[in-house]
Image (cartoon, rainbow, N blue to C red):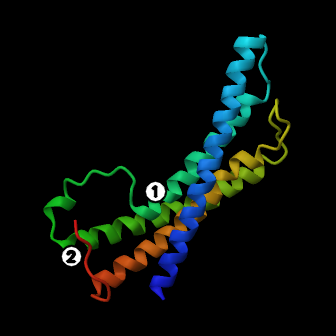
Amino acid sequence: MYERASRWADLVSRAIEFLCNAILAVMTLVIAALVLSRNLLGFSFSWSEELTRFLLVWLSMLGAAVLLRRDDHISLNLLQDRLSSRSRLVLDLLLRLLVLLFLLILAQQSWTAALARQVTHAPALGVSLFWPYLAIPVAAVLMILATLVNLWGDLLRLTGRLPMPDR
C-alpha cells in the first residue's frame, strides 16, 4: 500500500514539475515581451509585472511542494551526519512531525487569508487577489500529503518493513 501511495505522490510531483515548467515558460515570454515593448516601442504592458509576480508566487510554492516530496530542501546536516542510520531516521521522523504541524497551521491560516482577499482586486489585471493568495494553501495541502507519504516511509523503515536509506 505504501508503494502505491509513494508512486501516486511521485506522479503528482512530476505533474507539478510540468506545471512549474509551464509557469516559468509563461513568465519568460511575458518578461521578454515587456522588455521588447519597453525598449523597442517605448511602452510597457500594465499587467505584465503583476502577472509575473503572481506566477512567481505560484511557481515558488508549487516548487517547494516538489522539493519537500524529494527531501531536496536546503538542510544543515551536521547533526545527522554524526548519527547512526536508525538515530537519523528517528530525528527525520521528529522533524517531519514538526513540519507537518507547521503545514497544518499554514494551510488553515493561508486559506483564511485567501478568502479575506476575495473582494480585493489587482489594479492592472483586475483579478481577485484570492487567486495569487490561493497558491499558499494549495501548496500547503500538497506539502502535507508529501510529508505524510514521507513520514509513512520513515515509519516503515524504522520498523524494518522497508530497507534503511543509504546516506
Residue at figure coordinates x 63%, y 54% from the top left: 19
The residue closer to the viewer here, 11 or 107, is 11
Disc ID at residue 49: none
User: Quadrant location of the C terminus?
Assistant: bottom left
- When the figure is inspected, residue 57 is found, relative to residue 8, above or below; the finding is above
- Count neighbours of disc 1 (C-alpha within 10 A) and say few if under 14, some if 14 to 19, many if 20 or more: some
The three-letter amino acid code for the residue at tag 1 is Leu
Judge the density around disc 2: few (<14), some (14-19), many (≥20) Cα neighbours within 10 Å: some
Location of residue 34 (image quadrant): top right
Residue 109 appears in the figure: no
What is the x, y in percent for residue 81? 17, 59
Q: State the residue in front, 32 or 85.
A: 32
Instruction: Please provide percent x and percent y for residue 69.
Output: 46, 64
Badge 1 marks a residue whose secondary structure is helix
- Give the mark nearer the N terminus: 2 vs 1: 1
Q: Amino acid at mark 2?
A: Arg
Q: Secondary structure at mark 2?
A: helix
Q: Nearer the viewer, mark 2 or mark 1?
A: 1
- The one of 47 and 34 positioned closer to us in this rendering: 34
Asked if residue 11 is positioned above or below residue 47 in the image, the reply reads below
Q: Is residue 163 left or right of residue 44?
A: left
Q: Which residue is mark 2?
A: 86
Is residue 110 something that shows in the picture?
yes
According to the image, label 1 marks what residue?
Answer: 67
Query: Which residue sits at x=46%, y=56%?
Result: 67
Residue in view at x 80 percent, y 24 percent? 46
Q: Residue 54, relative to residue 69: is it above or below?
A: above
